[in-house]
Amino acid sequence: MRKKLVYCEHCGGMELSGTGEFLLFHHLTFCCVDCRDDYRAADEARRDGERAAATLATVAEVMRRDKAAARKPVSKRPRAA
């Protein structure tokens, strides 16, 4: 039977640092609390960036629709002879 290779997802270390066993966070392993917290903070920052980009895209779409609605062509009236 093969032994499973366990390493820290943040620093890549295979040695434990201040803990009795590797810590788990979203199925990822970390050698210490600091590595886990750093990874968590980076993950939250990435997610916040994605949310902000999605919000900007939504605002841009609403502005585009409003601008298009304001530019509706005026129907031409027939000329008087």
Image (cartoon, rainbow, N blue to C red):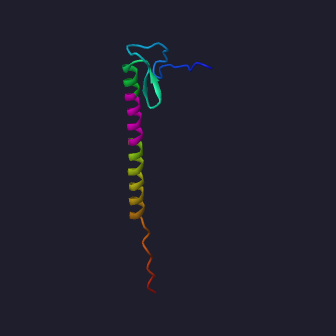
20 drawn magenta: no
Report x, y in % for residue 78.
46, 82
> Residue, x 44% and y 14% (percent of image)?
16
Total of numbered circles in the picture? 0
* Residue stretch rendered in magenta on the structure: 40-51
Residue 42 belongs to the span the image colors magenta: yes
**In the image: residue 3, left or right of residue 70:** right
Name which residue lies at 42% across and 56% down: 64
* Image quadrant where one finds the N terminus: top right
* Viewer-closest of 64 and 2: 2
Compared with 70, 19 (above or below) is above
By secondary structure, the bulk of the magenta-drawn segment is best described as helix
49 in relation to 15, above or below: below
Quadrant hosting residue 35:
top left
Q: Closest to the observer: 38 or 52?
A: 38
State the image coordinates of residue 53 (x, y, percent, origin top left): 41, 42
